[in-house]
Image (spheres, rainbow, N blue to C red):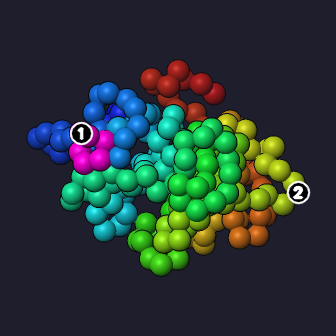
Amino acid sequence: MSRKGSIRYCTDEMVTLVAGSELSGFADGIGAAAKFQCIFGLMCTSGGDRLLAADFRNHRIRMVDIKTRAVTTIAGDGEALNRDGVGLKSSIVWPNRIAFDRSPTVKPDSVLFITADQSIRRFEIHTGRLSTCKWNGGEQAAMIDPHALCSTPSGQLLVSCSRTVHRFDPKTGEHEALRARSVHIPGECGGGR
């Protein structure tokens, strides 16, 4: 669970602080000494030993070692723009949602995808290289306000943008808008039709 400037671990009995505090800001460090500024995306690796966080207002990707509670910045220099590069020599604007390719098992070729402004960024975990995915047919103008992201077992991404879900192949750049069907959910959701 993440709150504005902190990451917490929840069980049935208690809530434990992993990293950060109620004071927003930017700092790498251990536990409460680390600072975040609005975490939007948060993923746990399959081994349960690391968290990857999209630190939205700091324009950075952060890694948290759950055992030691150490927080390190792995991508982004804090500038509010999208610039390809390696590690702290790259830039990412408004990192939002994140998803691993296929599986959250960290392997030598593991890749993390991140929505950033109106782009999808590709981060290679072991090399630290951050790059921008290209959509066939030009720039990603069709991808307005991406606010949800997930990967499929085949390696494609599903991206929710405004009222459209796009299926996107990051290897080829092929994409298509999927048709959504209206669903009636009775009760608290307003009883729409």
Q: Residue at x 29, y 28 (%)?
A: 22
Crowd tier of the residue under label 2, counting other residues whose Cα lies within 10 Å: few below 14, some 14–19, many 20 or above: few
Choose mark 2 or mark 1, whichever is in front.
1
Residue at the outermost right position:
137
Q: Residue at x 24, y 52 (%)?
A: 69
The reply to whether dot 2 and dot 1 touch (C-beta < 8 Å) is no
Residue at the outermost bottom position:
108
Indicate which disc, 2 or 1, sits on the residue closer to the N terminus: 1
Is 92 on the left or on the right of 180, as rendered? left
Which residue matches tag 1?
32
Camera-side residue: 187 or 13?
13
Position of residue 30 measured from the top left corner of the image (x, y, whole percent): 25, 48
Distance of label 2 from label 1 (alpha carbons): 46 Å
Q: Residue at x 53, y 54 (%)?
A: 88
Camera-side residue: 50 or 36?
36
Camera-side residue: 108 or 147?
108
Kind of residue sitting beneath label 2: Gly
Kind of residue sitting beneath label 1: Ala
Which residue matches tag 2?
137
Residue 142 seen in render: yes
Position of residue 70 measured from the top left corner of the image (x, y, whole percent): 28, 53
State the quadrant of the N terminus.
top left
Position of residue 178 measured from the top left corner of the image (x, y, whole percent): 73, 51
In the figure, residue 171 lies in which quadrant? bottom right
Is 7 on the left or on the right of 60, as rendered? left
State the quadrant of the C terminus.
top right
Count of numbered circles in the view? 2
Task: Find the magenta span and give its range.
Answer: 29-34
Numbered disc 2: secondary structure: loop
Numbered disc 1: secondary structure: helix
Judge whether residue 110 is colored magenta.
no
Q: Residue at x 87, y 54 (%)?
A: 138
